């Protein structure tokens, strides 16, 4: 039989190697030893570590391990460049981004080959996915640079941005970070991953060729200590990090109280849901891309297969057959499906996790066949016979390992999909578009793909919920992450509120006149939890004093158990998020109407607590409720048109349970101004009112009850603000926390919130005048919501 006949007989792929010659020539031109790129110049190499080709274990180059001094030089260069770079017109900045995009396209093959050699991913993926998306991001953000002033009025760049990227998509993650930062007018100090620094260094050369002003982009290579030096540098204004959830939590703690902007794109354990009416063959091809793309080293990898029980046996059989055809080998071979993992340490970590999962009852399937030589190759793996508690189901493996479970009903599919601390992405396969679009909003993830997977575009935001982080990359949301309100820099320190430290009782100077109390009945305020008034668990009450120090009332002294009960009630009321926006608007209007009906009573209570005429504050509170009632059905999303046969619906969703600790000043408006946007967007709330003047909010209980606010949507716990804020920050059932208070307490809140990576807003001891109308709109609405992008097949 001749060779051609043999090929038709076996249908085996022949080798199709990509030549590494140009990449090697580039490395040789640098003597295979690199310093940093700082202030438009290359530094001399310092202490180095090796960057190896994971497929061959051969050293590619020596990379300098950046020191704190190197980082400081880069930050100073970026700071010196910021004034002139940010002063350029958007058009001028856009021209530089456009030039970078063009240069990347001109050298796309060199970038692709170098990426594959350094990272181990198949050349097909580097060539056909990564590098085109890199160019797309710079083109897209070149346009944003020119249109920022129209879209983001009264916003300015942060300044110097510190950016730390992972090793799984080295150049693409660089583009996701640098393109929007430069478009916004920021300057950058970026650290690539220690395993995969080479394409970032090649990118620095592109910046040189494009004539980018010196200091605008600085590349500092190094290991973990280099990244820590960036995070902790006092002259960096924003940190953007992509990597593990564990490191993300450390960064959240390290930046607490610093005032630095922060965006975190962290780990995932994404569900891949296949319903019984799905096109099974298409779903299997999608699954191959979802979990074995880049050897499974993808934060949004569809690593949890959830297949409907009625098709489970057939689906698993077809999947195993497809796994047997996947080719593992030299990543520079264009016929290879699965390349090398990034480093031996990653291979060992995956093997250890599989051993743990097997001990817990998991059954491991690997297709037949031999692995190529080398220490960084693994076969594709299918894991069955697992429960939701199995290590392989719960932990992010970051490798070519798929775990499979079955479900019977759509409700069970949703429960299994959401049974994770992560919330980055999800995939839904069904020929019933009604079913798919019913499931999509129920999945707690930042990206949902319908009948597709791993779709990305610069125009569409990407980012997660829960412990997958906060902030977005790409799209309008990603652009917003690199801008801040221009007026924030003018904020002054807030006046120090007079309060009893740590809730300790204060000796009143006498009995004041309380216009709302009679001489016969005591009106000690209780908590408001689950739609009912409840006595404080502590059994203690706090005195409420007028400005002269006279006692005018008492309020319950809340503790950890009261917060626990309030959070449980708030979580039980999360169906509020699925109520129609019109319904939420009507309830807020009703709340404003009922508050206005009792305006004289509330004004008198305010005067008793503050000594000031309360009429204006009541009027402002009513107006603020009206404002956010009006926003409830208007603050919505958009439809994006990426260059695929799909549209992406950017859906604005509530965050979930929000803790709100109101400022001591403006006892009524301070709470209403924060409560109203949270409710308008569908969140449920645990509110801690002014510690010194809580009676205006305890009087609000009857207004809430008569305004049809569902039980558990608003829960109120009085007590010491800082103590209760710490409890809220540490509670994993709280998804976001807003805190108005001192700089020290704000730092504590941000640091304590790292446990479940909750989103925070704090005043940091600054005077945010909540009476200002700038707080009637997007400022708090954006912080009370998160965007889910749902990709839907569309067009021919």
Image (cartoon, grey):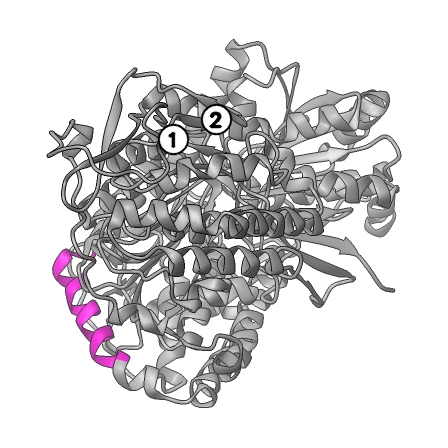
The residue drawn where x is 69% and y is 30% is 414
Please tell me the numbered disc located at residue 660.
none
**Is residue 236 something one can see in this rendering?**
yes
Viewed as shown, does residue 347 lie left or right of 238?
Answer: right
Q: Identify the secondary structure beneath mark 1.
A: loop
**Counting other residues with Cα less than 10 Å from the Cα at mark 1, is it few (<14), some (14-19), or many (20 or more)?**
many
Contact, CB < 8 Å: mark 2 with mark 1?
Answer: yes
Viewed as shown, does residue 12 lie left or right of 526?
Answer: right
Where's the C terminus, which quadrant? bottom right
Please tell me the numbered disc located at residue 529.
2
* Residues in magenta, as a range: 65-82
In percent of width and height, residue 518 lies at 35, 30
The residue drawn where x is 71% and y is 39% is 287
Residue 584 lies in the magenta-colored region: no
* Magenta stretch secondary structure, dominant: helix
Asked whether 104 or 50 is in front, the reply is 104
Q: Which residue is mark 1?
A: 717
**Counting other residues with Cα less than 10 Å from the Cα at mark 2, is it few (<14), some (14-19), or many (20 or more)?**
many
Q: In the rendered view, tell whether residue 740 sits above or below residue 538.
A: below
In percent of width and height, residue 285 lies at 76, 43
């Amino acid at each position: 039989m001749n060779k051609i006949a043999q090929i038709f007989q076996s249908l085996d792929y022949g080798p199709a190697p990509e030549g590494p010659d140009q990449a090697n020539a580039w490395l040789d031109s640098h003597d295979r030893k690199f310093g940093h790129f700082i202030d438009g110049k290359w530094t001399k190499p310092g202490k180095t570590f090796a960057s190896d080709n994971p497929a061959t274990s051969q050293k590619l180059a020596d990379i300098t391990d950046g020191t704190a001094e190197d980082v400081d030089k880069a930050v100073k260069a970026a700071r010196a460049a910021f004034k002139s770079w940010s002063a350029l017109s958007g058009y001028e900045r856009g021209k530089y981004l456009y030039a970078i995009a063009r240069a990347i396209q001109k050298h796309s093959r060199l970038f692709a080959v170098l990426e594959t050699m350094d990272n181990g991913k198949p050349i097909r993926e580097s060539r056909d996915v990564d590098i085109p998306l890199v160019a797309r991001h710079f083109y897209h953000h070149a346009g944003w640079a020119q249109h920022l002033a129209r879209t983001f009025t009264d916003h300015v760049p942060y300044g110097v941005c510190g950016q730390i990227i992972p090793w799984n998509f080295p150049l693409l993650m660089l583009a996701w970070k640098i393109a929007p930062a430069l478009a916004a007018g920021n300057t950058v100090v970026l650290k690539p991953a220690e395993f995969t620094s080479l394409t970032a260094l090649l990118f620095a050369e592109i910046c040189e060729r494009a004539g980018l002003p010196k200091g605008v982009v600085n590349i500092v290579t190094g290991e973990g200590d280099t990244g820590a030096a960036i995070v902790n540098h006092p002259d960096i204004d924003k940190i953007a990090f992509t990597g593990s959830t564990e490191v993300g939590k450390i960064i959240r703690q390290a930046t607490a109280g610093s005032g630095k902007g922060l965006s975190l794109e962290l780990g995932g354990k994404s569900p891949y849901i296949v319903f019984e009416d799905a096109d099974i063959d298409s779903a299997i091809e999608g699954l191959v891309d979802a979990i074995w793309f880049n050897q499974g080293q993808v934060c949004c990898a569809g690593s949890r297969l959830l297949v409907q029980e009625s098709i489970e046996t057939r689906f698993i059989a077809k999947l195993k057959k497809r796994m047997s055809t996947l080719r593992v080998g030299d990543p520079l071979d264009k016929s290879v499906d699965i390349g090398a993992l990034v480093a031996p340490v990653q291979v060992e970590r995956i093997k250890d996790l599989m051993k743990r999962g097997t001990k817990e009852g998991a059954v491991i399937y690997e297709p037949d066949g031999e692995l190529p030589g080398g220490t960084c190759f693994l076969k594709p793996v299918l894991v069955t016979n697992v429960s939701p508690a199995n290590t392989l189901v719960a932990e992010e493996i970051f490798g070519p390992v798929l775990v499979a479970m079955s479900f019977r009903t759509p409700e069970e599919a949703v429960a299994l999909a959401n049974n994770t601390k992560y919330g980055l992405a999800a995939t839904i396969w069904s020929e019933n578009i009604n079913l798919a679009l019913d499931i999509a909003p129920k999945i707690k993830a930042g990206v949902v793909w319908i009948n597709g997977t791993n779709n990305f575009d610069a125009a569409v935001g990407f980012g997660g919920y829960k412990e997958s982080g906060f902030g977005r990359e790409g799209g309008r949301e990603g652009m917003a992450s690199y801008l801040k309100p221009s007026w924030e820099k003018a904020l002054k320190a807030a006046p120090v509120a007079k309060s009893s430290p740590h809730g300790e009782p204060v000796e009143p100077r006498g009995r004041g006149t309380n216009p709302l109390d009679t001489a016969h009945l005591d009106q000690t305020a209780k908590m408001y939890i689950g739609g009912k008034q409840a006595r404080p668990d502590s059994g203690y009450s706090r005195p409420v004093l007028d400005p002269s120090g006279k006692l005018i009332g008492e309020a319950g002294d809340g503790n950890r158990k009261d917060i626990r009960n309030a959070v449980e009630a708030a979580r039980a009321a999360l169906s509020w998020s699925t109520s129609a926006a019109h319904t939420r608007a009507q309830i807020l209007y009703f709340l404003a109407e009922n508050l206005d009906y009792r305006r004289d009573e509330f004004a008198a209570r305010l005067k008793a607590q503050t000594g000031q005429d309360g009429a204006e504050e009541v009027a402002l509170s009513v107006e603020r409720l009206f404002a956010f009632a009006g926003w409830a059905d208007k603050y919505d999303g958009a439809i994006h048109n990426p260059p695929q046969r799909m549209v992406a619906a950017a859906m604005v969703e509530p965050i979930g349970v929000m803790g709100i600790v109101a400022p001591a000043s403006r006892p009524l408006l301070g709470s209403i101004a924060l409560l109203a946007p949270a409710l308008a967007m569908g969140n449920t709330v645990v509110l801690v009112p002014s510690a010194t003047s809580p009676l205006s909010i305890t009087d609000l209980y009857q207004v809430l009850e008569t305004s049809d606010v569902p039980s558990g949507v608003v829960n109120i716990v009085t007590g010491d603000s800082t103590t209760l804020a710490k409890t809220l920050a540490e509670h994993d059932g709280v998804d976001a926390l807003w805190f108005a208070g001192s700089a020290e307490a704000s730092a504590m809140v941000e640091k304590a919130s790292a446990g479940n990576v909750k989103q925070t807003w704090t005043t940091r001891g600054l005077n945010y005048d909540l009476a200002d109308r700038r707080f009637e709109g997007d400022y708090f609405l954006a912080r009370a919501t998160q965007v889910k992008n749902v990709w839907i097949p569309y067009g021919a």
